[in-house]
Amino acid sequence: MRTDRKLVVRVVAGVALAAALAAVVAVSASASQAGAKKTMVNTSVSGSISFWGIWAAQEQTAFEKVIKGFTNKFPNVKVTYTSKGNDMPTVLATAIAGGNPPDVADVAQPGLVKQFVQQHHLKPITYAKKTISKNFAPAWVKLGVVNKKLYALLYKASNKSTLWYNVHSFKQAGVKAPKKWSQLTKDAKTIKASGTPAYSLCGSSGWTLTDLFENIYLRTFGPAKYNKLSAHKIKWTDPSVTKALKEMKQVVGNSSNLYGGTNGALQTGYPQCVDYVYATPPKAAMVIEADFVANEILQATKAKPVKDFNVVPFPAITAGADASAIETSGDEIITFRNTPAIQAFVKYLATAKAAEIWAKLGGFGTGNVHVPASVYPDAITRRTEAPLTKAKAAVFDMSDEQPAAFGSTTGQGEWGIFQKFLQNPSNIKSIQQQLEASAKAAYKK
């Protein structure tokens, strides 16, 4: 039988080349084991994951970089992200009814998570509990627990306990950033006397009014009572609500100290209220809202961090309440299916690495204790996001925890009733009765 000499030469050459390459790989691997650990990949997990989120534009771009970090580690898993906008509760409900929800989703309403758990739509993520507990304080882990079982990871968080002020307006009035509520209410009068209304309210966006009430209630009565009211274990006619509304009246009750007066505040939405504080000249001295105010200031105004705008924690009210407690909102990761690929992805999102990728880009906060403050891109972001990892207690946005009909529907429930309170802040008893009636009806459904 004749042998093809060219074929033999090619085979020998191929074997030699393969051996040489193998040798190079072996030498490279042994020469830098530490580097190999950093770039170690896992090819044993494979599959595809469909992910629906509310993030779009810059936020979508940022999260896709997080996904890339995951797929670098798990190259045989493909994650497909689809932005569904802010109407996620309706989108998911429709998909569930049609029998085709995504594998993974992010939602901003713990109340919706509880609803899906009760309806047996979600899969628990107990496989990630060890990783989450390693990276998050117990208060943060608890935010994802329903019926004593872990169903959600609060991946992206916002610090809602912040007050933003115009540095020049405060200097002109001769006042400093307030640490206590009594100081705030006193300085507000001084600011008004200096020629600028103290407050810019986003009254047409009802959720901003609930945020103000919630921070006042938290700073007055602490996290335990806050959580009871969130779960409707305390009635809205309770004396504690009366006291909190009286404190809130000190802000919303003086029409002359609101930019545009009461009527103007009711017609101003978010983020327009932020722009007013940093207009030239400023139309108001401060706005009380969450950490995402910074994004609006930087995108829509010429104000510069520290020089023109600054931020402080929501002022302390009652000595017995935990002044370090944080009201947070954010996006919880939930799963409708359970596969090795999904498990790997959820565990990855709970790591410091997955948080740092986005944190470096800005517009991101996390309760992950292993994310250093130095990761955040500027001093203002460090000031608002670092407390998320240091807070001894964290509570979720109260209105987001409640049934949507009461807590998060335009023109009705809390949003609509707090707008009525802004319109007539003296009618506290009637407001409480309306809140309780609305809550009762929503919880019955």
Image (cartoon, grey):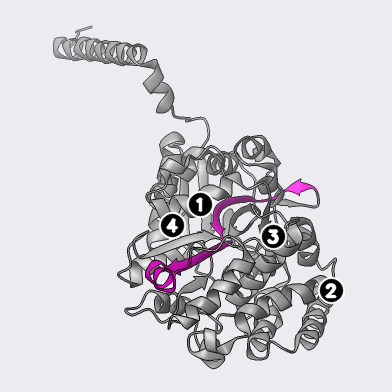
Q: Nearer the viewer, mark 2 or mark 4?
A: 2
Q: Are marks 2 and 1 in contact (CB under 8 Å)?
A: no
Tell me how far mark 3 sits from mark 4, CA to CA: 24 Å
Tell me how far mark 1 sits from mark 3, CA to CA: 24 Å
Q: Between residue 441 and residue 419, name the one nearer to us.
A: 419
Instruction: Tell me which numbered mark, 1 or 3, is placed earlier along the sequence.
Output: 3
Q: Residue furthest bottom?
A: 263
Q: Nearer the viewer, mark 1 or mark 3?
A: 1
Q: Which image quadrant: the C terminus?
A: bottom right
Instruction: Tell me which numbered mark, 3 or 2, is placed earlier along the sequence.
Output: 3
Tell me how far mark 4 sits from mark 1, CA to CA: 10 Å
Question: Which element type, helix, strand or loop, lies under badge 3?
Answer: helix
Relative to 170, say whether 377 is above or below. Answer: above
Instruction: Judge left or right: residue 228 versus residue 372.
Output: right
Q: Which image quadrant: the N terminus?
A: top left
Type of amino acid at the residue the image marks with label 2: Pro
Disc on res. 113: 3
Q: Nearer the viewer, mark 3 or mark 2?
A: 2
Disc on res. 239: 2
Instruction: Tell me which numbered mark, 4 or 1, is placed earlier along the sequence.
Output: 4
Instruction: Judge left or right: residue 100 versus residue 301.
Output: right
Relative to 352, say whether 105 is above or below. Answer: below
Which residue position is annotated with label 4? 363
Quarter-of-image position of residue 413:
bottom right
Tell me how far mark 3 sits from mark 2, CA to CA: 30 Å
Which stretch appears magenta?
148-175
